[in-house]
Image (cartoon, helix red, strand yellow):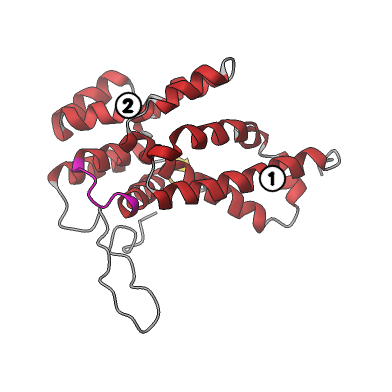
Amino acid sequence: MSLSPDITGPSSPPAGPIRRPTRRSVLAPPRPSVVDAALAIARRWCAGHVIDGAPALAHAVRVAVLLGRHLPDAPPPLIAATLLHDIPDYTGPDALAAEVGDRCGTATLVTLWLIHGEHIAMDQYRHDPAAATRRLTLLRPDIAATLAADKVISLSYVLGGARHAPDVHAYWADRRAFLLLVPYFRDFLAATAPHLPDGLADQLGDLVREAGRALVLAAHLPAHQPH
């Protein structure tokens, strides 16, 4: 499946009589060479993988574009690492380090591992939420923003599906793993919000609150009987 040509292009101007300059997407050409290299690597390693009901590359692009809207001056290595943020799940660390380090540089590789390091906090959260939350407060602001953008994209997909589900009970019954993450999402937001761009923190906050309402709803629904 090919990406829609406007995914990496400039955003559309706002409707209305006042014409403001469009904000250039961080993925709009011409791109920095490190971003082009990251796109090529992501395209190859993401092939065959699906995230949020779409090709994994499309997810990576959406996260990078959203991050760029909130951090328009984001350095190219951060955008490159954002495009690659799911790649550690698809290949071994040695192969990843060799290719990313060679083609995208050390700054991109270090940033990628810092982004992927959230998995440590998520694993720790299961048995020591307070320690995991303290770890999240120490994230670099740019890393926190990347992780927040990733959550905005994924939560928007899951919660959007619930809004359009013909049977919301069945929908949430099939997504228990997501519901179990809601407390983590709340604590992630609390730990990182002071360091996020205001608009991004607001977006994530709205989605986390909606996820919390879904958790309450699921807890009060009668037991779901599979068909």
Q: Relative to residue 169, is residue 1 drawn left or right?
A: left
Q: Indicate the quadrant containing the C terminus: top left, top right, bottom left or bottom right.
A: top right
The residues colored magenta run: 70-76
Q: Relative to residue 40, is residue 117 drawn left or right?
A: right
Which residue does the image show at 74% across and 41% down from the upper left?
216
Q: Position of residue 22 (x, y in %)?
A: 27, 69
Residue furthest out toward the top: 127
Q: Based on the displayed image, in which of its 4 quarters is residue 23 positioned?
A: bottom left
Which residue does the image show at 36% across and 40% down from the upper left?
146
Q: Give the CA distance from mark 1 to mark 2.
A: 30 Å
Label 2 belongs to which residue? 114
Of the residues shown, which amino acid type is indicated by label 2?
Leu
- Residue 75 shown in magenta: yes
Image: 93 above or below 146: above
Q: Relative to residue 212, is residue 148 drawn left or right?
A: left
Q: Residues within 10 Å of mark 2 (few under 14, many from 20)?
A: some
Label 1 belongs to which residue? 214
- Residue closer to the observer: 120 or 37: 120
Sequence-first tag of 1 and 2: 2
